[in-house]
Image (cartoon, rainbow, N blue to C red):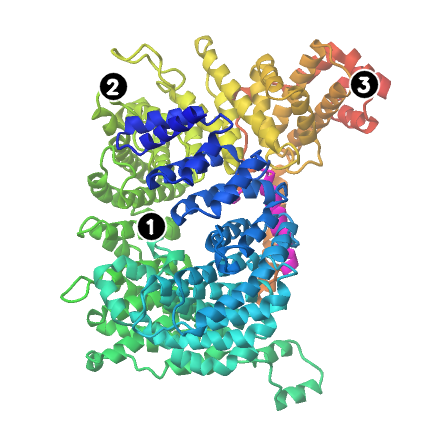
Amino acid sequence: MADDLTQIVHFLNQTLSPDATAVRAATDALDRLSVTPHFPFYLLSISTGAGDQGLKIAAATYLKNLTRRTVDSTGAKPSNVSKEFKEQLMQSLLQVDSSVLKILVEVFRAIAVADFVKHTLWPELVPNLQSAIQNSHLISGSNTKWNTVNGLLVLHALLRPFQYFLNPKVAKEPVPPQLELISKEILVPLLVVFHQFVQKALASHRIAEKETEKVLLTICKCLHFAVKSYMPLTLAPLLPSFCRDLISILDSLSFDCVVNQEDDYLTRLKTGKRSLLIFSALVTRHRKHSDKLMPEIIHCVLNIVKFSKNTSKLPFLSERLLSLGFDVISNILETGPGWRLVSPHFTTLLESAIFPALVMNEKDMSEWEEDADEYIRKNLPSDIDEICGWRDDLFTARKSAVNLLGVISISKGPPMETATDSLSASSKRKKGQKNKRINQRRSMGELLVLPFLSKFPIPSDSKLSDKKILNDYFGVLMAYGGLQDFLREQEPEFVTTLVRTRIMPLYTVAMSLPYLVASANWVLGELGSCLPEEMSTDVYSQLLMALVMPDMQGPSCYPVRVSAAGAITTLLDNDYMPPDFLPLLQVIVSNIGNNEGESESSLLFQLLSSIMEAGDEKVAIHIPHIVSSIVGPVSKWLTANLEPWPQVVERAIAALAVMGQTWEDSRPEESESDESRETWAMGQVAIARAFASLLQQAWLTPLCTLDQEDQHAPPSSCIEDLSTLLQSVLLSIDGNNMIQELNVSELLSVWAEMIAEWHAWEESEDLSIFDVIKEITNLDSRYKLKKFIVKAMPSPPAPPVPERSIVEGIGSFITEAIKQYPSATLRACSCVHLLLHCPTYSPETEGVKQSLAVAFSQAAFSRFVEVQSTPSALWKPLLLAISSCYLCYPDVVEGILEKGENGGVTIWASALCHVSNRSFEPGLTTEAEMKLIVMTLARLIEQLLKQGRTGDEIQNCFTSLLEVSVRLKEVHDGNEDEQGSEEAEDEDEDEDTDNDDYDEDSGTEEYEETEEEFLNRYAKAAEALENGSAIEEGDVEDQELELELGQLMDVDEQSVVLSLIDKYHRVLIRGLVLPSELVINFLNAFPSYNSYFQQHR
């Protein structure tokens, strides 16, 4: 055993070597030793011993990684860790130094989740931890080996899983008994200790000892996790005293300009931050217990936010507390008692706290010059660019103050009864009078906020030197940006007046005020949904000017251009259509690639995408010219073998993809003139040539620049958008000459290889890939693409092994999609039918088809087994995919099903019958689905009969066969009358539309979901997600996909059924008990079968 320990120490030391080969060899050796039962104990002993610090951390890290590999992270099954190891781990956690503790506590958390949180299999955990904390050195006061901070950190790790609901499938989940136990045994006694520590820390009016501050912070973290979602019964009575302790801590903090930056004070600030998070949790989640505490909380928080005037001079953590203070007030104001508690302070809040946080300061100006993107992220957020959204790490006092101002502006006091109301009450109410009374409750935006903001004069040419006026008006603009909910409730004339008088005049002095113009752009973007159409035109013209504002002497105008782009995007998203898109497009195209950095070009590409999506057919005419103009700059940025590509390239390709799709959507109808169709076709070819050139540079150039031995797939960046470009190229093909000119076969080979190795299922939508697969199959049916089914042998000196063909690469992608990507299951399964039945396979290539059928059936059946417990939307596509494979190779697929699950054929057959039933949702809806089911059941019944099978299995299959045959006949007969019925439906829809318009005008209020309905809906969604049956939004639309069965559609399914009945009618008809109604319906649909069903007549 000593030798084993020596070996482990040696290999751990080797993992610290700078030699990568030595590290790999040592890791492999440790992996081999990890299967021995004493290995975890050795690692724990080394990590807590007296050896080298690097060795201890290496041992703890390997133990953490080993635990992650061996313990189920979902907690679905226990950890199987021995009781002895758990005890030794607990002993170690309470004694080790902080650097090792941070690692070992992850080991503890993984085991605790599996054995205590999920399965309650560690009964001694809570008593042992409670004893260790109570007897630790700071709490007991004795010279014990247990470290108080260590014990609290272990408690913190134990409570972490309880910060979120453990069972989201339950609408109103009770407090877990494990949390109640922790609360009763540990947290309740700990609050008494917490109170003592608070008194001790605050008694000297100075920062307490480092360990004391850590104890306060860690206890607050523990309590935050305990009440963030649940409220333990034993904890609720102690909340008042606990909250008063938190208030005392907050009152001890200083927000003066000069702030102590020592570690101990930073710990106190973190405790204050956690205190405010606890207040927010209590107010938003536990109103029953927090209502009585709100007056004290409000008083405390008001004393914090009044220091917002010092924001520019405060460090991040202090500003974060100010931000949380504003958030707590917002949360309280949104509760029932909120108005009564907060409204008396509205004026003071606005003048002394909110507005000072909005005013421009020195920090803003320095950020504008030194890090413009950071300035934009904090102050000018928009949807135009990923960097512009509010992120969790960008909490600022200004952002929270703007949010609070918005909440105040829409708040209304209790209804005031006037003399008019009294008179109305004595007479009969007229229609609409109730709404009139409600409207008499004027909001604080009208009564307080706008009058306050109107006091600040708008800067003019004569006041440009007055910094206070400029800085204050920056705050005014920030405030306007937070009033969008309030302004949305106002009449259009009100918003028009505000914009014309308080925002638009800034553009007359734009060059001198870039800070204000950038903010004005942002405000116009925020108010985009409130602007009337006639106002939008003037706003758009000013934003277009701001978009091209050049850099002059003084501050950079980059934020001005970014905010203008974001505001224009918002206008377009709110259905504003410029009278002419050409000037905007010319500005964008002329500026792409003409600025110093790539960031502005990236921004312009994003704006271009938004224009294409909004403008649609109005901008389509310009697309060929735009594509030819921007492909050049994109080619310069496209560097071979660089992954990931620069953001500007990704945005450019995304914009090109949108343009390609927009152009395809503008395809003229057959009824339109020959000239328009010829013009469109010429544009399509020009676009295709530009896209093909770019794809060749992206995919083929990297391969050409490498030696034969070093060749590998090109970067898979932007595979979704590049697939859209490839689809545009394929749609333009009108002959073999274009296939050769555009290198289509080579592009498809590389593309197929890329998607075959595609594993970023959680990172990107891949829907365009499926569209390309369909188009490739159609193209092969017309022109017999090279390398589609079989790829030629590689040239020497490469080994004589055939490379993966296009269809084989696609097959690998489809297989992985079925296994791993629930939201793509429907599309992936539809491709199974496409690839098996549409291409023409020769006897020489039959092996390729069979390998595809094997892979598809394995993937579909394994996925079905995972979701079979509850019928869901995934059943039908998976079962139909297996059916297509079965029709091609019944014996092979039967073997796969039996290997995948005992009785696999029976499981599949039973589920297939279930899906065939009329009551199943979503059931069989198309002719192709029914035809496939009929042919599959006929083949399956024949196979089962040949195998000598009898009984319920045959009965169910034959019953389903007859039922689906009848439904299929109904579909055939109904197709003749379909056109007439559709016309009648269109007329009805027109009438319904008129009625809908009338209803909208009548002012019917939108239904608002109750809290109970919301919780129930999300509980059902969580259950569906856990069962693997949840369908994402994109896949709901895919449920209407029409199956393409290729050559299978030419088969007469009724001949197949007739042949089956003729051959086996003695067993199927005389030997089975069939429902009489089904037989009657079947014979009514197919009278020619009467002779076989004489006994049922």
| Magenta: main secondary structure | helix
Q: Amino acid at mark 1?
A: Val
> On the image, which quarter does residue 555 sit in?
bottom left
Mark 1 / mark 2, whichever is N-terminal:
1
**Marks 1 and 2 close (CB-CB < 8 Å):** no
Which residues, given as a range, are shown in magenta? 1011-1034
645 versus 862 height, above or below: below
Camera-nearest residue between 762 and 809? 762
Give me the C-alpha separation between circle 1 and circle 2.
47 Å
Coordinates of residue 70 in the picture (x, y in percent): 51, 32
Q: Which residue is labeled 2 in the image? A: 709
Q: Is residue 977 left or right of residue 247?
A: right
Could you tell me residue 382's position as x and y percent?
Answer: 36, 59
Give the secondary structure at mark 3.
loop
Report the amino acid beneath label 2.
Glu
Amino acid type at circle 3 is Leu
Which residue in the rendered view is the most extreme toward the left?
A: 553
Sequence order check: which comes first, mark 2 or mark 3? 2
Residue of label 3: 1072
Q: Nearer the viewer, residue 46 or 827?
A: 46
Which of discs 2 and 3 lies nearer the camera? The answer is 2
| Front residue of 331 and 653 | 331
